[in-house]
Amino acid sequence: MILSKDELRKAQLLMLSILKEVHRVCEENGIHYFLSDGTLIGAVRHNGFIPWDDDIDIGMLREDYEKFCLHAHEILPENLVIQNEYTDPGYGQCFSKVILQGTKWVENVAKKTSRKYFGLYIDIFPYDKITVDKKKQKKQGKLFKLIKFLIFTKLGYKISYKSHFRQFVYNTCYGIAKIITMFVPAKVLFKQRNKIIFKYKDLTEDYIITKFGGSYLKNINPLESFKNLELHQFEDTQFYIPCAYDSILRNLYGDYMKIPDASEIQTHGIEEFDFGEY
């Protein structure tokens, strides 16, 4: 489904309203967050959304993330709900979403899952410690990718590829994984995933920071990159971004100030949407 310009803009403004509430409760409760990924590009390149962007991403260091998740049901307004593996057993990601209830926003990859919530959302990514040892990084990344694939298969997430060959290979692996995961409870897979993510959580030196939702190796940065935050314009409000945004974005995207060609633009493949009373 291709959204019209007006439909996309309405969705963006509703997501912006969620971000404003998250910003407010974080300020009131001493929780640090920062715009990340495409939303961070939008802030520094457009002072708002990338024109075609259909989501909002923010990040938190693990301590802040856990604090936010623990108290979300108390501090968020009633029309917002947090979605993660603890609040929605049909949700397979390793990060959380804050969802606007009474709306619908169904992505292609998740349309056949049994998730409890499918509304408009913003993503909240935890950033975790990993070792500086590159061989161990790659091993950890491969293990995470495998367990993510098994979880997605178990819960009904399915990816579509333009390449017929890649789709054939994926479908073959998916079929095998589907049989394997029939005999493994989702909770067991979640436990193994968390074991991989938290492998280096107790390191006090020789560590760096990454996020497991997304491009694992391209998101690697020193802790100092996220220690200093500053307010920056995004649409009609100022939100926090890392002062080291340039090095973070260059690691992840290269020349992030360059507008990509139409063929390089990626969206979340929205299959169905409904703005409800909004």
Image: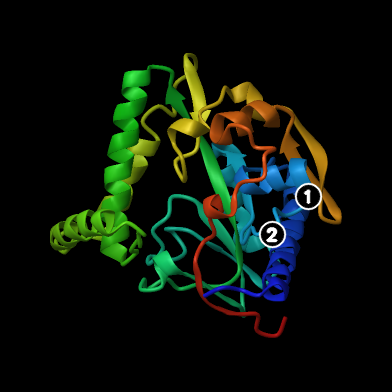
| Label placed on residue 75 | 2
Which disc, if any, is residue 41? Answer: none
Q: Residue at x 22, y 61 (%)?
A: 171
Residue pictured at 38% horizontal, 17% vertical: 133
Q: On screen, 237 above or below 119?
A: above
Amino acid of disc 2: Ile
Q: Vertical placement of 227 versus 175: above or below?
A: above
Q: x and y percent of residue 258 in the render?
A: 67, 39
User: Is residue 119 visible in the rendered structure shown here?
Assistant: yes
Please identify the quarter of the rendering in which residue 252 is found: top right
| Residue 122 appears left or right of 45 | left
**Residue 263 x %, y %:** 53, 53
Count all numbered tags in the image, as a single digit: 2
Left or right of residue 72, residue 29 in this image: right
Which mark is first along the chain, 1 or 2? Answer: 1
Residue 66 visible somewhere in the drawing: no
Label 1 sits on residue: 28
For this rendering, which residue is in front, 230 or 190? 230
Secondary element at image label 2:
helix
Percent across and percent down for residue 48 are 77, 52
Residue at the (69%, 29%) spot, across then down = 246
Residue shown at 78% from the left, 49% from the top: 28
- Secondary structure of the residue carrying tag 1 is helix
Cβ–Cβ under 8 Å for marks 2 and 1: yes
Taking the image as shown, residue 129 lies to the left or right of residue 27, namely left
Q: Residue farthest to the bottom?
A: 277
Inspect the image, locate mark 1, and give the three-letter code of the amino acid beneath it: Glu
